[in-house]
Amino acid sequence: GDSVTQMEGPVTLSEEAFLTINCTYTATGYPSLFWYVQYPGEGLQLLLKATKADDKGSNKGFEATYRKETTSFHLEKGSVQVSDSAVYFCAASGGSNYKLTFGKGTLLTVNP
Amino acid sequence: EAGVAQSPRYKIIEKRQSVAFWCNPISGHATLYWYQQILGQGPKLLIQFQNNGVVDDSQLPKDRFSAERLKGVDSTLKIQPAKLEDSAVYLCASSLGLAGEQFFGPGTRLTVL
């Protein structure tokens, strides 16, 4: 079945630092790829997605590009804020039922 | 628009007891999912419904877990009897259809003592 491997945390950055969280996947076919975010005390929210190779998903200053050749979907943000502190999950969706497979999550803490 | 509702938010039980969780999806969403999220891990799909039919329950421990969505709207997930390793957050999600964006509820945190 599909699997998703993402950078293990925790990741601690200072405000305005550059963020990269690595994510790679294994799947048959060409899955859609997602980043979800879970803020403290809240439910999972979709942050961005890409549905085909070379697509770039973006939202709230975050970006990720679907790289088929490296089977990767790394999350980046040029300047993080304290409010970005959360757990970030990479996920892949494939198969006839579009089943979502999640990575283990990466805890990001941004200090002022 | 109301989001996915779940109850209870927290539950503490002793091993071998039974427990049930309830989920009400976003109105009009045909597809409903139950996930188990163990501390430090990503959510794992337990069961997926399309209306009131099961699409995927390959990772549901059927000897102790059961789920139903009788009228194709709200759903109940039951564990009987619970084990220590069932301690987790149980997430419900819904989407318009199989390929639609999934919207998650706040989850139910289960602690089995």
Image (tube, coloured by chain):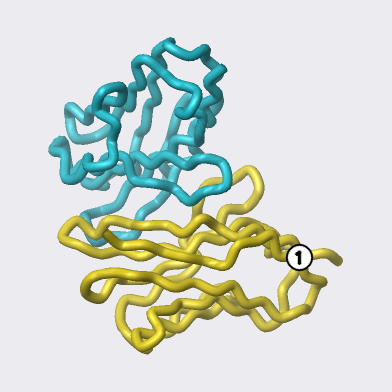
Chain colours: A yellow, B cyan
* Chain to which mark 1 belongs: A
Please say if B30 is above or below A85.
above
Q: Is residue A70 or residue B94 the one in the foreground?
A: A70
Bin the neighbour count of mark 1 within 10 Å (Cα to Cα): few under 14, some 14-19, many 20 and up.
some
Question: Seen from this angle, which residue lies furthest right?
Answer: A112
Residue flagged by tag 1: what amino acid is it?
Thr
Residue in view at x 55 percent, y 74 percent: A22
Corner quadrant of residue B39: top right
**Residue pointed to by mark 1:** A12
Residue in view at x 51 percent, y 29 percent: B87
Corner quadrant of residue B91: top left
Of the 4 image quadrants, the one containing the C terminus of chain B is top right
Corner quadrant of residue A95: bottom left
Q: Is residue B72 or residue A63 the one in the foreground?
A: A63
Query: From the viewer's perspective, is A97 left or right of B8?
Result: left
Residue in view at x 40 percent, y 51 percent: B103
Percent of width and height locating residue B46? 31, 40
Query: From the viewer's perspective, is B71 left or right of A4?
Result: left
Percent of width and height locating residue B64? 30, 22
Query: From the viewer's perspective, is A94 left or right of A15?
Result: left
Please say if B17 is above or below B1.
above
Residue in view at x 43 percent, y 79 percent: A72
User: Dot 1 lies on which element?
Assistant: strand
Please say if B79 is above or below A10.
above
Percent of width and height locating residue A14? 82, 71
Query: From the viewer's perspective, is A80 left or right of B73?
Result: right
Q: How many marks?
A: 1
Percent of width and height locating residue B70? 18, 27
